[in-house]
Image (cartoon, rainbow, N blue to C red):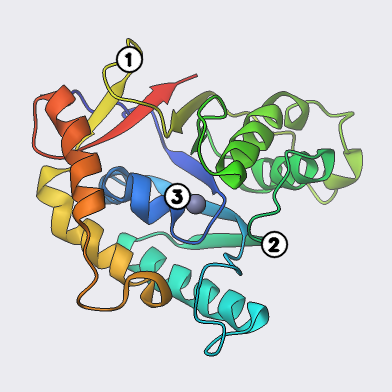
Amino acid sequence: MPKWPFKDVKRLIFVGAHPDDLETVTAGSIYRMVQRGVEVIEVLCTDGNIGTHDTRKFTRASLARTRRKETREAAKLLGIKTVVFLGHDDGELEPSLALRTQIAQQYRLYQPDTLMTFDPAVDGHPDHRAVGRAAVDALIPSSMPFYQPQQLKNGVKPASIKQTFVFGGRPRSKQAIYVDVTDLWQMRLQAMRAHHSQYGNPEFNFDWLERWMKRQGKAAGVKYAELFRKL
Ligand SMILES: [Zn+2]
């Protein structure tokens, strides 16, 4: 049985690219943290405004509005009180200095002790790599008072994040950290379904997600597991 890896976490900042990233990859761990009194701040870099094939039903702007609303609904289910949208366009995220600055500002405003984000070393969606890179690259500058000093007005202090967990890697690596989410499977699906524009159809099949979480669970010796690596 894997050991609970988040015992030192009091305030967590999750930095993702798309409105459903948290629910898809980490919902079980996040929910359990909230149950244990951890305050979670969810920062999303894009509004997921290309996430549909139904170009008759949505415009980019209406899809962005819909997806923000869905994100708040899912956050409520999971007990996340703070959601921050940085408002970038889906599919066009770059690990730019501007993005680094924006993320650093969130570290300073919310003063989390722990960061959770995509593993920047893992291939996959370009927005995921970009957000992981920018979030990790913001760690050191955000802690330095001469970096973007205009952010440090009105009592805002440099950030002091003590630990970082990344996700998106493969199971069975030496550094793999598992969280048993077997008893949270229904909760996970419920949080996914809050993203109606993506998974609202009751016929929608979550076999892909089940295979993914089972593969990680198998490596952890449980049915379903989420997978992290500590930086
Ligand atoms: Zn995503």
Residue at 20% in and 75% down: 203
Outermost residue, bottom side: 56
Q: Residues within 10 Å of mark 1 (few under 14, many from 20)?
A: few
Residue type at tag 2 = Asp
State whether residue 95 is above or below residue 30: above
Q: Which residue is mark 3?
A: 40
Residue type at tag 1 = Ser
Q: From the image, state whether disc 3 or disc 1 is nearer to you.
A: 1
Q: Which of the two residues, 160 or 19, is positioned nearer the viewer here? A: 19
Q: Which of the two residues, 194 or 80, is positioned nearer the viewer here? A: 194
Q: Residues within 10 Å of mark 3 (few under 14, many from 20)?
A: many
Q: Residues within 10 Å of mark 2 (few under 14, many from 20)?
A: some
Side of 194 where 183 appears, left or right: left
Side of 83 where 139 appears, left or right: right
Side of 191 where 16 appears, left or right: right
State whether residue 162 is above or below residue 206: above
Q: Which residue is mark 2?
A: 89
Q: In this rendering, does residue 183 appear at all?
A: yes
Q: Which residue is mark 1?
A: 173
Residue type at tag 3 = Val
Q: Secondary structure at mark 2?
A: loop
State whether residue 38 is above or below residue 169: below
- Separation of residues labelled 3 and 1 (CA atoms): 27 Å
Marks 3 & 2, CB-CB < 8 Å contact? no
